[in-house]
Amino acid sequence: METEETRAQRVTSADVARASGVSRATVSYVLNDDPHQTIPPETRERVLKAAQQLGYRPNTPARILRTGHSPIVLAVLPFEQIDPNLAQALKELEASLAMRGFTLIWHVGLHLRTGKSHPSYNVTPGVILSYADETSPALSSFLQQFQAPILSMLGHSSVQQEVGKMQVSHLLQRGKRRLLFAASEREDVRVLTQNRLEGVRQGCAQWELEPPTVCVIPASRERARAIIHDLNLHQALPQGICCYNDEVAFAVLAALADEGIAVPDEIAVIGCDNIPLAQFSIPPLTTIQFEREQPLDMIVEMIVAASQGKAVTEMPQAIPMVVERRSA
Amino acid sequence: METEETRAQRVTSADVARASGVSRATVSYVLNDDPHQTIPPETRERVLKAAQQLGYRPNTPARILRTGHSPIVLAVLPFEQIDPNLAQALKELEASLAMRGFTLIWHVGLHLRTGKSHPSYNVTPGVILSYADETSPALSSFLQQFQAPILSMLGHSSVQQEVGKMQVSHLLQRGKRRLLFAASEREDVRVLTQNRLEGVRQGCAQWELEPPTVCVIPASRERARAIIHDLNLHQALPQGICCYNDEVAFAVLAALADEGIAVPDEIAVIGCDNIPLAQFSIPPLTTIQFEREQPLDMIVEMIVAASQGKAVTEMPQAIPMVVERRSA
DNA sequence: CTGAAAGCGCTTACAG
DNA sequence: CTGAAAGCGCTTACAG
């Protein structure tokens, strides 16, 4: 006994061909604007109208199977949390890619971090956008299974180091010379964290400050406070804290408030990412924001090129800029 | 002149068949554990090993084309921002679905809200998970094109109304009897906002409080403060503010701080969603959290059932619970 | 300029 | 128990 097949029968290119009195080949030529063919406007019109009326949508799996390449772009985001600004950028990228006939989809799988072998992934991307900050074996094997070009979107470590340097030099401009680096507990941003910390170290060296103290801020208010407390701040008060990102900065701000330490007078705090909530911290958070250096179109062109098998040299970099508010 | 085809040739089921000395049919039977066939263990073993050695992965488009159904589950999230807890829930769902052979992908397209006609979407889902809180024509036509079952994941409006009621009754327990509802500027959560507000109204009626004042909190610190200021709070101070969600609550907390109003003594504030940052507001945010009523497996079962064409009655509801911190 | 035909890689009745 | 064959819906040389 079969399940009743109630779903409407899909309309195929054969239906369109029949309705417009041409062959399936011609339908395909018209709908794909094949440059090798010269279709009389009258025929073209007829096919287009029939397709429209029947609500024809070409079957993607059939198309991918036949052409051997896929218009799907897979963004791989192996993070526990997703920065809202990154999400926004991806939405814009999706819209631009859509105008070129490509479809951007997100992969945010947990298995990328657990290291367990991945189950079969039932999507066939033609290009992969990797936002990973490090290449674990689990991630590599996941990405490689697709046999598609992999574009690394996170940019040079030098950009991340630049963030650290900018934090230091901003703090220094505010007269803060004894610095602390506040890292995140999160495992998924380890390399990013290391790069920003390295930038802070370089900044300190460059301006002849003492190397930064480093501490990890837990994702719990009580424990964050305890860490700040145990630093014995009254003994040798650091004057500025470079936070790995804005989430850590919120935790630091909370811990300092709980300890009764004034921001920015006693300790200045600077974050990174400029999340939408950053303006609502108490005091409002001074942070770093990434600006796109190149227009979105250029990134789209590179993705299209990669999908055509052309070697892509390097993705455009983002430029970090200070957003000054009250915390530093 | 053709682009050089450097990419390695894909290994197909024919390769596996050749390597293990059986037909493609047998390969398929073994790999799919076809219950209608009885394959001798020895043959089975041989096929499995060959597939393994060759690194064979069945071509998904071919499979979808042939079987006529797709193992892809499409989560449609027409929001400007994505609640981190929802993102987390989706990741868990993805992992569970993967164990059943389904692949969850996200669609977060901007076009869903602009109302512009959507470009062709090159993915063929077998089931759609809609997280939309209202059905615009743009969204409906986007969802309908797939001719796949659509599961509405946001639950009854009654659950959202329950949120509002819980906010009121928590505030009342704290002795706050004059209430304000703080809405978001965001267009994408209109219906959700209306439902939570309706709950607040019902709560006020039920406990014989005056109906809540309603105001919209802008996504800018200065303008948020101006709104709060213009309410002339010193004249008829509301005693509690029910916020649409935690983001709004952060803005409200900032505005109150800027106006020098003490939380929770003068005004208590309660949010909704319990985002990860909620514990780090000043003071820590009392809010509402959604707990899953049913185990994840049940949701997975319903999705699997829907993909097989079975009518799905209703998705399990989430249960709202108060998370008490210091702001109320 | 148009159509008949092959074939992408798979699954699945069907025959042996 | 196994294999030859058909066919999902499309695109694209190729012949006319």
Image (cartoon, coloured by chain):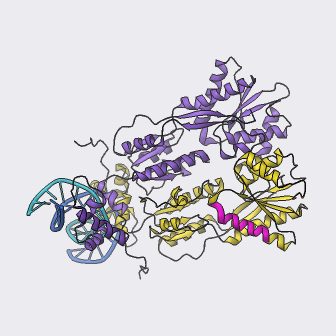
Chain colours: A purple, B yellow, C blue, D cyan
Q: Is the magenta stretch mostly helix, strand or loop?
A: helix
x 87%, y 54%: residue: B233
Q: Does the magenta stretch include residue B44?
A: no
x 49%, y 66%: residue: B143
Residue B288 visible somewhere in the drawing: yes
Q: Which of B166 and A95 is in front in this view?
A: A95
Total count of labels:
0
Query: Is residue B149 toward the left or the right of residue D7 in the image?
Result: right
Residue B44 visible somewhere in the drawing: no
- Classify the position of the N terminus of chain A by image quarter: bottom left
Q: Which of A307 and B113 is in front in this view?
A: B113
Q: Which of B149 and B237 is in front in this view?
A: B237
- Classify the position of the C terminus of chain A by image quarter: top right
Q: Residue B136's spot in the image, x, y percent?
A: 55, 67
The answer to whether residue A61 is above or below residue B302 is above
Query: Is residue A143 toward the left or the right of residue B166 in the image?
Result: left
Q: What stretch is highlighted in magenta?
A: B188-201
Q: Residue A233's spot in the image, x, y percent?
A: 82, 29
